[in-house]
Amino acid sequence: MKRALLSVSDKEGIVQFAKALNEMEFEIISTGGTYRLLKENNLKVTEITDVTKFPECFDGRVKTLNPYIHGGILYRRDKDLHKNEARKLNVQAIDLVCVNLYPFKDTIERTEDFEEIIENIDIGGPTMIRSAAKNFKDVLVITDKNDYSRVIEIIKSKKDDINYRRDLMIKAFSHTAQYDTLISNYMNERFNNGFGEKQFIVGNKVTKTRYGENPHQNGALYEFNNFYSKNFKTLKGEASFNNLTDINGAVKIASAFGGENAVCISKHGNPCGFAMKQTLLDSYNEALKCDPVSAYGGVAAINGIVDEELALKMNEIFLEVIIAGKFTKKAIEVFSNKKRIKLFEFGKERLIISDDKYDFKHINGGFVFQDSDKVKINEIKNAKLVSEKKASSNDFRDLEIAYKIASLTKSNCVVYVKDSAMVAIGMGMTSRVDAAKCALRKAKDLGLDVKGSALASEAFFPFRDSVDAAAEAGISSIIEPGGSIRDDEVIKSANEHNMSLYFSGIRHFLH
């Protein structure tokens, strides 16, 4: 008779799983709450103390750490030495181990009580999982309740070959690694401000992409806290690696204004159009005016619901991706005959973001890790007026929009906004002056009037020349962090040109 050890914190599905094992004549060994639940459901089950010949002790801290358990899991069935030793020591084989771990994540989300948190660090569970995974050729190891029915099917059909066992082994080691990572990161966040001697980044695989940035590269999407699995819905097409990174940038900008009807059009991760009007249709029309050439083949992020009217308008040009809060059925039908377009939604009234606490970037030989950059709620409202002229309420609204876009755009950048719509942008330049000139030149080529617009820079102007150039273009107000050794010259220039100038005091580089 084969033996199975079941010890789970999340008990969903465990009764049905145990019943199926009973029917296949597995002897079931179990612990604590799992044992009681199985007994209550009239299943044949052996309490673990009957195997260990030793009681659970120290408030349950020790119950499975025993040679009768780990010997039964770890001894190799293909080695006579191991089999003889098992017989000599009266260690019986355990052929299946099903364990999921103490709910550490739920605990730290629920309480700050360190004593309770410590008690919800599983010791025996990870040890049993690792023992079973190490001896995967002889022991089936299950750590995911979603695998229960498949495991039963595999055992019944006698298809638990080395490849299937190896897959379960990899999943098991990944499970314990993720668990230990969660504990380590929590402790470092609590006691080392999030920056300990080791930094671990763990994501769950959502899907493979057809390839990476280029066809010769492999790629896949991984997620934190099931963000994409829970929220991101594919309505049409398949998101590529580049689509996902472009969507990320566009959604951040379009969702940066709460419940406003904001639309951001981006290309290669940079915004080429943005507007925030009374309706989403008006927002899209105004956003498209900023750079309709770049918008071709781009990503449109719609902070709301795409209806038929808006869909018809967007369908007039080639947009590769549209991401929205939702699409109506009629809106989806509008795009049905367009093969290359891809539609995604979050299933909500508005776009959503995960609001990750940390950010990181790969560099050659490692990665750099930091707190995520966010524009604070009152950062713009509390910006310091340093010029003689104060911005009007409309101008200040445009400053807020320009500032938020600039904070989410590749440096060096400048953003021009007029009447709640972006009219020019220069980004990713080695010179801020070049960024300003490039933006103005493009606006001129498109016949866009920037006079009276608000200008934002994500970092300070090192010289007054940028302000002089803005004045020449007819810019009415500027917001920037300030902090240059020549701030006095910059302020003087603003006053000379009768412009309003605000310093936020906070830089938002994006490299």
Image (cartoon, rainbow, N blue to C red):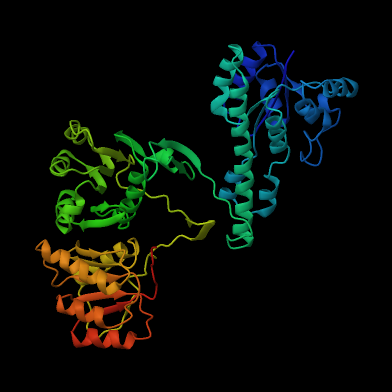
Q: Is residue 295 left or right of residue 182?
A: left
Along the line of sight, the residue nearer the viewer: 64 or 299: 299
Residue drawn at the location 68% of the way across and 16% of the way down:
43
Of residues 464 and 362, the one drawn nearer to the viewer in this rendering: 362
Which quarter of the rendering shows the C terminus? bottom left
- Percent of width and height locating residue 243: 33, 44
* Residue at image point 20% right, 51% down: 295
For image coordinates 71% across by 28% down, the residue present is 135
**In this view of the protein, can residue 283 be seen by the observer?**
no
Q: In the rendered image of this protein, does residue 457 appear above or below residue 192?
A: below
Classify residue 233 by image quadrant.
top left
Q: Residue at x 18, y 43 (%)?
A: 318
Left or right placement of residue 186 versus residue 270 in this view: right
Count of numbered marks: 0
Q: Residue furthest front?
A: 216
Q: Residue furthest left?
A: 447
Return the residue nearer the eye: 264 or 255.
264
Measuring from the top left, give residue 245's x and y in whole percent. 36, 49
Where 23 sits versus 412, above or below? above
**Residue at the right extreme?**
88
In front here: 439 or 262?
439
Image quarter of residue 397: bottom left
Where 334 falls versus 479 (above or below)?
Answer: above
Look at the picture and state if 219 lies above or below 466: above
Quarter of the N terminus within the rendering = top right
Give the x, y percent position of residue 181. Answer: 61, 48
Q: Is residue 473 visible?
A: yes
| Left or right: 240 as drawn, with respect to 14 | left
**Residue 72: x, y in percent?**
79, 25
